[in-house]
Image: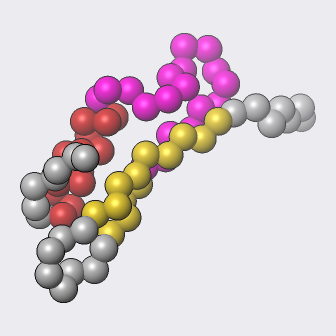
Amino acid sequence: MHVRKRGRVNALGAACYRPGDHRPRFVYRLHTWHGRKKEAKSFTLNEYCAFLTALHHQLHAPVVLV
């Protein structure tokens, strides 16, 4: 069995704060690239959109990007 240590892990995260006595949250997604042909090396536009949608649903609040 031949194992190559070739690959990449990309992280996408957001630190979320709400006014008042709410605790801050850190929400993240990981994207692993295994080095295969025709495999995306980084996040796609659809994955960014899905992350923002999931963030909105998880926080039950509007998301403001700065």
Residue 25 point in image, percent of width and height: 32, 69
Return the residue found at the far bottom: 21
The colour scheme is secondary structure
Return the residue found at the far front: 66
Q: Which residue is drawn at 30% across and 73% down?
A: 24
Q: Residue at x 21, y 61 (%)?
A: 58
- Above-or-below relation of 46 to 14: above
Does 3 sit left or right of 47 as displayed? right
Q: Which residue is drawn at 34% across and 61% down?
A: 15
In the image, is residue 12 part of the stretch drawn in magenta?
Answer: no
In the picture, residue 1 is in which quadrant? top right
Residue in the foreground of this view, choosing between 33 and 19: 19
- Above-or-below relation of 18 to 15: below
In the picture, residue 14 is in which quadrant? bottom left
Q: What stretch is highlighted in magenta?
A: 29-46
Residue 4 point in image, percent of width and height: 83, 32
In the image, is residue 30 part of the stretch drawn in magenta?
Answer: yes
Question: Chief secondary structure of the magenta span?
Answer: loop
Does 15 sit left or right of 17 as displayed? right
- Above-or-below relation of 14 to 11: below
- Above-or-below relation of 27 to 52: below
Residue 60 point in image, percent of width and height: 11, 63
Does 55 sit left or right of 28 as displayed? left
Q: Which residue is drawn at 40% across and 52% down?
A: 13
Q: How many labels does the image show?
A: 0
Residue 64 point in image, percent of width and height: 17, 50
